[in-house]
Amino acid sequence: MNFSPSLADVLQSAERLIVSAIAEDIGSGDATSLAVIPSGMKLKAVIVAKAEGVMAGLPVVKAVYSKGDSRVKVAPVINDGTRVKPADVLVNLEGPGISILSFERIALNFLQRLSGIASFTAAFVAAVQGTGTVILDTRKTTPGYRVLEKYAVRIGGAQNHRQGLYDMLLVKDNHIHAAGSITLAVRRARECYPALSLELEVKSLDQLKEALSLPVDIIQLDNMDLTAIRQSVALVNKRVPLEVSGGVKLDTVREIAATGVNYISIGALTHSAPALDISLELVG
């Protein structure tokens, strides 16, 4: 909705994470590879899928090896967004054997994590296909990885919600509690940041009725059951876009979408996506 990281954003964010990962994993050197592999040996390898899914993060693999040892040639066979199946070759690598193996786990960690998010997201997007409802992510991301994880969500076919606390107003229950009322919380937010989009979280039909009299851009129906969601859609009657959030699962998302809401935001896209099984294998 508000933020869509470009590939340049992703690579810029990935660079500092790669530096940190190299320090964390390799430290003074890959002792095993240094001991076992002759110094000048060249090797060839492939990165292959071990499960079906949607790929995301291939440019980050190139960035890992570029930062670790630019002599390693990294040639992706497919692009991000491609659906793969087990045994599909994703990347060809060639170069110093020690470096190929030393940076293997770092490259795979990024690729497995981002591809897992893209694959999980794609499943939700497929589940609501034809309803007109848009799947959104949330701020429930791994600290430091937000740009990368939101990129993976977009590769999976969903859209991004706000990037952080600074680029959109989202008045939630704790803000309302602190302000004393929905009306006062919204009024203060609008007065302080008139240029930002304002979303308001409501938890009941009574709160929704109050919200409809306020200058809000989106209303979020938080943790409402299906009956309440349907009643909310009828009450709003398309005057304001509606977003559902809270406890949405793959087996319930289509029924929620069928109520006619505009958006469904799902924290699980980033906080609970299983990593996609991917491996690196030497060849030749």
Image (cartoon, rainbow, N blue to C red):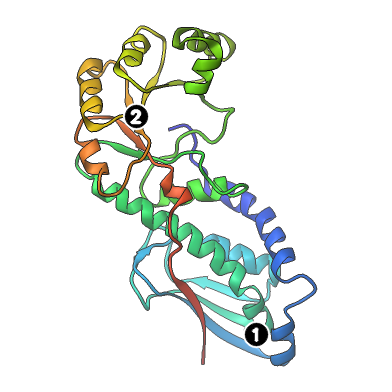
How far across and down, in percent of the image, does residue 228 sit? Answer: 24, 25
Residue 243: image tag: 2
Q: Is residue 48 left or right of residue 24?
A: left
Give the vertical position of 96 relative to 148 (above or below).
below
Looking at numbered disc 2 in the image, what kind of residue is underneath it? Glu
Q: Badge 2, how many Cα within 10 Å: few under 14, some, many 20+? A: many
Proximity of marks 2 and 1: CB atoms separated by less than 8 Å: no
Seen from the viewer's position, the closer of residues 70 and 86 is 86
Give the vertical position of 72 relative to 241 (above or below).
below
Give me the residue at 72% from left, 79% from top.
Answer: 30
Image quarter (top left, top right, bottom left or bottom right) of the N terminus: top left
Asked which secondary structure carries label 2, the reply is strand
Q: Badge 1, how many Cα within 10 Å: few under 14, some, many 20+? A: many
Give me the residue at 38% from left, 36% from top.
Answer: 246
The residue to which callout 1 is attached is: 97
How far across and down, in percent of the image, does residue 67 sit? Answer: 69, 65
Seen from the viewer's position, the closer of residues 44 and 270 is 270
Looking at numbered disc 1 in the image, what kind of residue is underneath it? Gly
Seen from the viewer's position, the closer of residues 160 and 182 is 182
Give me the residue at 70% from left, 85% from top.
Answer: 32
Give the vertical position of 193 relative to 146 (above or below).
above
Asked which secondary structure carries label 1, the reply is helix
Sequence-wise first label, 2 or 1: 1
Which label lies toward us, 2 or 1? 2
